[in-house]
Image (tube, coloured by chain):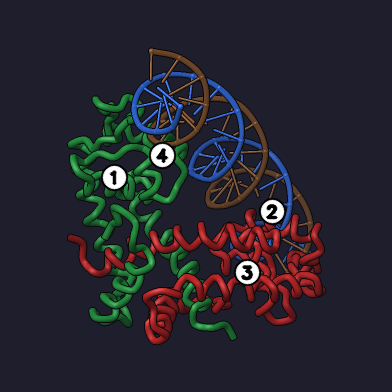
Chain colours: A red, B green, C brown, D blue
DNA sequence: CCATATTGCTTGCATATGGAAATATATCGG
DNA sequence: CCGATATATTTCCATATGCAAGCAATATGG
């Protein structure tokens, strides 16, 4: 009915909805954080000096700057991130991963890896998973600071 | 750093965010509807007698029943869908695609196919797109009424 | 046949989010 | 150096969404 390109796009939307549902529950229950909060911490973890401006975080998370402001506030209260100014540019307010945040994201990553493996447990071979990862990587390529 | 399963999941989340951004703009501008509304109409289009209960729509769209109620209301005002009761079960309130709705979804599908093709324009061969669609299909399999 | 449980739908409430506006700072062109 | 422009962040407002509660209708078990 639809051509392969449309099919791929439509299925991607569906697969995403299913995965978000699945991961939100598990990660939230285990670590007390929503999937999106864990992703924020993961981006910080892989950034130089484990810090990013709110604007850069917004780009990496595909959300608006205001959303980053509001996501960072509770994480700051929980001491998972800190706030630091740039000595050269007083406009910038970096979100910095704390030691506690690093610990949490390390654990959350392990949980995520277990859950991800579970997604592919049945009916998937290793090369197929690798192929999927490679092809999806092409869709996100060109952006700075991709996860995975 | 991460294993292939995690990599695939993380990239899927990222790719989805990028695609939603891209498609929301285009579809919205051309047809006045959000991507999610178009998906609702597409599910109706492919359903028997072009109608679905709100519960079934919710499952297909991966949203809550209340969201379906609220999504259907404006579409009904626009005469894109109608509301019909089931003669056997008075609890059911079907969302039925109207003639105008069918026209719109036909046009929107064409737009979507053009935009989808554009996503893969560079650096993708036909077999690669087909492989991606097939692998993603496996992630959504088992659900009734998948699109694409 | 009736009481109870289940199902489909809607509404109230709390939360999440994007966009516009406001503010502060930095950069650029003369 | 100065005014105009651009950038980073926050706040206000409108919208979207899930969940729990409520209601109506159906199914179930005695």
> At numbered mark 2, what does the secondary structure look like: helix, strand or loop?
helix
Q: Are marks 4 and 3 in contact (CB under 8 Å)?
A: no
Tags 2 and 1 on a common chain: no
* Residue under pointer 4: B68
The mark lying in front, picked from 2 and 3, is 2
> At numbered mark 4, what does the secondary structure look like: helix, strand or loop?
helix
Q: Chain of mark 3?
A: A
Tags 4 and 3 on a common chain: no
> Percent from the top left, x then y, of residue A147?
56, 76
Mark 2 to mark 1: distance in Å?
34 Å
Left or right of A9? Residue D10 is right
Mark 4 to mark 3: distance in Å?
34 Å
Q: Chain of mark 2?
A: A
Return the mark for residue A56: 3
Tags 1 and 3 on a common chain: no
Tags 2 and 3 on a common chain: yes
Mark 1, Cα crowd under 10 Å, few <14 / some 14-19 / many 20+, is many
- Quadrant where the C terminus of chain B sits is bottom left
* Residue under pointer 2: A70
> Percent from the top left, x then y, of residue A104?
73, 70
Return the mark for residue B41: 1
Mark 2 to mark 3: distance in Å?
15 Å
Counting residues from the start of the chain, the first of labels 4 and 1 encountered is: 1
> At numbered mark 1, what does the secondary structure look like: helix, strand or loop?
helix
Q: Which residue occupies the foreground of this view, B114 or D16? A: D16
Left or right of A42? Residue B26 is left
């Amino acid at each position: 009915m639809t051509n392969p390109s449309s099919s791929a796009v439509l299925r991607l939307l569906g697969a995403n909805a299913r995965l978000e549902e699945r991961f939100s529950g598990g990660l939230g229950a285990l670590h007390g954080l929503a999937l999106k909060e864990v992703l924020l911490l993961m981006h910080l973890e892989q950034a130089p000096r484990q810090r990013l401006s709110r604007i850069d975080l917004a780009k990496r998370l595909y959300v608006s700057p205001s959303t980053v402001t509001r996501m960072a506030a509770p994480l700051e209260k929980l001491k998972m991130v800190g706030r630091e100014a740039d000595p050269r540019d007083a406009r910038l307010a970096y979100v910095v991963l704390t030691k506690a945040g690093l610990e949490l994201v390390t654990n959350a990553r392990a949980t995520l890896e277990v859950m991800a493996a579970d997604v592919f447990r049945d009916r998937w071979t290793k090369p197929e998973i690798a192929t999927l990862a490679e092809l999806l990587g092409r869709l996100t390529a060109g952006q700075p600071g991709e996860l995975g």
